[in-house]
Amino acid sequence: MREFYDEGSRVAVQTTQPLDRMLTYRAPEGGCWQGAFVEVPLGPRKVMGVVWGPGETGFDASKLRAVIRVLDVPPMRGEMAEFLARVGDYTLTPMNHMLRLATRAPGLTNPPSMRKIYRMGHGDPGRMTEARGRVLDTLEEHGDLAFTLGELAELSGVTSSVVKGLVKTGAVREEESPRDLPFPHLDWEAPGKDLSDDQARAADMLRAGIESGEYGATLLRGVTGSGKTEAYLEAVAACLAKGRQALVLLPEIALTSEFIKRVEVRFGARPAEWHSGVTMTERRRVWRMVGEGGAQLVVGARSALFLPFRDIGLIVVDEEHDSSYKQDDGVLYSARDMAVLRASINSAQVVLASATPSLETWANAEAGKYARVDLTTRFGQAVLPEMRAVDMREEDLPGDRWISPTLKRAVEGRIEAGEQALIFLNRRGYAPVTICRACGHQIGCDHCDARMVEHRFLKRLVCHQCGETKPMPDACPSCEAEGRLAPVGPGVERLAEEVAEVFPEARVAVLSSDLFGSARALKQQIELIAGGGADIIIGTQIVAKGHNFPLLTLVGVIDADLGLQGSDLRAAERTFQLIRQVAGRAGRGEISGLALLQTFQPEHPVIRAILSGDEEGFWKAEASERQAAGVPPYGRLAGVVISSPDLDAAMGLGTALARGDAPLRDIGAQLFGPAMAPIARVRGRHRVRLLVKAAKTAPLQAALRAWLSQVEVKGDMRLSVDIDPQSFY
């Protein structure tokens, strides 16, 4: 039962402000419920907070300031408060940061009112200008989403008068609307597509979990093209039929529009969307409607997990292996793992879908913690592609070329047959290094210890760590020699140049995230390719994420060995996942596919596992190695990064922590470091790393708290803790 606090009684309020404790206030006129979102005074400001429980006693109540007002939004549910607390405890994140993550919607403190919103109209815009075109492009890109005047003008890069001019023509529709309308009803009774036997078996298993009304986790493992989406949409329908809400997490915004179309076809209406491409107006609407039950299904990025669902019954994590589910700044959490936690708290089902699951998920299924259902064949007449290695030690290829004669012949054959070929290289830009042939200087970032990457399409050098850019210089910054700067190694842009030379008659499309200024432009390119508008596709890892190109029958991987270098404990797993996923783009139509892997190490165990298709054998071998080393998922790791403009200060704090490691030794944990991070300086800050390794059952968080409490982080020094780190740079 939710606690009610009478007017004038003491209440503890957790705010989103950077404070290390809750504050006690007097309950407002009319009282308030536990979980109520409130506006409170803090110094001269008014800030938002949540009534967490009874306030502190032992001091004069007359000194207390009163809650200003209770906000017109549903109170935070007990399950949500528990979820935030447990995520915070696990990741060692203060509650104020957790609350900020859970209230990332603008205008929550604004009272309800009528407002003007703007959508695409049906009128003729008349005289078309570049500015008017940008407004219409913005509206088309965002479907039927609503904008305020300021949002639409800002997103389009125009003045508000341009928008008003389009309103007069009828090309843009202006409406008076009450704040935050519910989303259209989804028809869960509408029939879905005909399912294969594999899909029907998977759908029945997922529906049974929904019908139980209890917590359960299921690994939905299906080979690429097997129809995992249609199987879990049946679970979504079952969830909606029970009156509960569903959440589908996707790893890439570029995938959202295609998935939204499939949902619209299946249920007759668009779901709510939550990702960085959504307007602020729509973000507020989604947040409110999720809490009020006015949104049945949300499709979104990882942060959608922290929306205030009224009654969530199903969470789907699509492509659950994808590294983008790990948040690497602010609150450091894994959306995949926290989805399982949220489902357990809410007595909901969680479905982890992938063709190449993470080792953590595979191990949990092996241990019986998760159920598992497999889709072993492609949908319809499609079959899995044949996999072959191209031994680059036997290919006659100049040092400045990367397309082997074997791959060249294969591409030519596919083009002649009217089919498509994909040439894959997981490296953005033109060249990863630019070197001076006169003095040997490599152009680096001014703010990071990282080489700048040439992006020839942009005519600039870009740092992939901090985003700093600068024009490509004519002379060497070190020795000032002119005309001696040379690119070293290939990126997709350099590969595109080679493709244009080798296949001069071919229509070429390049898919790389940095080449598109908007999600709409990327979507248009993907639609162009899917419609047969290109003969050769050149792409980075963005092409591996769920796209369906029916005419694509050949995949050539330029450097299959690229991800096998370095000491990352997940290097083998990630290489296996990425190449299997990208190879899976081939042969999804009626014509069988072929994947050619250019490699200098065809005998490498990972390459052999990819070629053989023995995925279970690969996971078992990888699990055995991890188990022997005592690393995740069979052990625990925590990374600590200290950063400061002063290297000595950062290293000094790291040394002090190393000397005070008794709390870690007490639980049998090992401490490695301090040492300079592999990328030792980012954005002008020096970075020092420590790594803690502990047994699977060790009480790691408590030991970390005790250990870190011994030092004080002062001034502009920063210390971050990453439980279960995915990156070690």
Image (tube, rainbow, N blue to C red):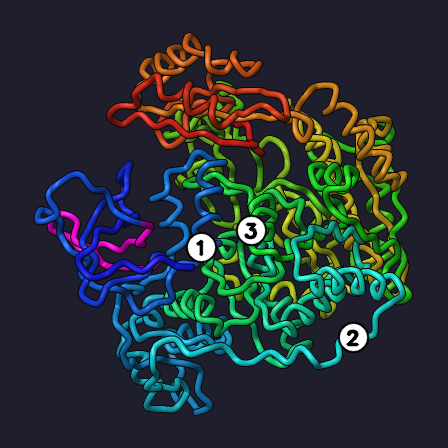
Q: Secondary structure at mark 1?
A: helix
Q: Can you give x and y, in whole percent of width and height, for residue 623 in the image?
A: 77, 29
- Assess whether residue 51 is covered by the magenta stretch: yes
| Residue 352 as seen in the image, left or right of residue 588 | left
Residue at position x 61%, y 48% in the image: 340
In this picture, is 149 found above or below 28?
A: below
In this picture, is 185 found above or below 86?
A: below
Which amino acid type is marked by label 2? Lys
Q: Quadrant of residue 611?
A: top right
Q: Which residues are magenta?
A: 35-53
Q: Nearer the viewer, residue 558 or 82?
A: 82
Q: Give whichever of discs 1 and 2 has the lower sequence position.
A: 1
Mark nearer the viewer, 3 or 2: 3
Query: CA gap, disc 1 to disc 3?
Result: 10 Å
CB atoms of marks 1 and 2 within 8 Å: no
Q: Quadrant of residue 505?
A: bottom right
Q: Main secondary structure of the magenta part?
A: strand
Query: CA gap, disc 1 to disc 2?
Result: 38 Å
Question: For the residue carrying disc 1, how many other residues have a C-alpha within 10 Å: few (<14), some (14-19), or many (20+)?
Answer: some
Which amino acid type is marked by label 1? Gly
Q: Is residue 479 visible?
A: no
Query: CA gap, disc 3 to disc 2?
Result: 32 Å
Residue 78: mark in rendering: 1
Residue marked by disc 2: 193
Q: Nearer the viewer, residue 571 or 468?
A: 571
Seen as rendered, the residue at the extreme top is 659
Q: Can you give x and y, in whole percent of width and height, for residue 586 in the image?
A: 81, 55
Q: Nearer the viewer, residue 168 or 256?
A: 256
- Assess whether residue 656 is covered by the magenta stretch: no
Residue marked by disc 3: 345
Q: Secondary structure at mark 3?
A: helix
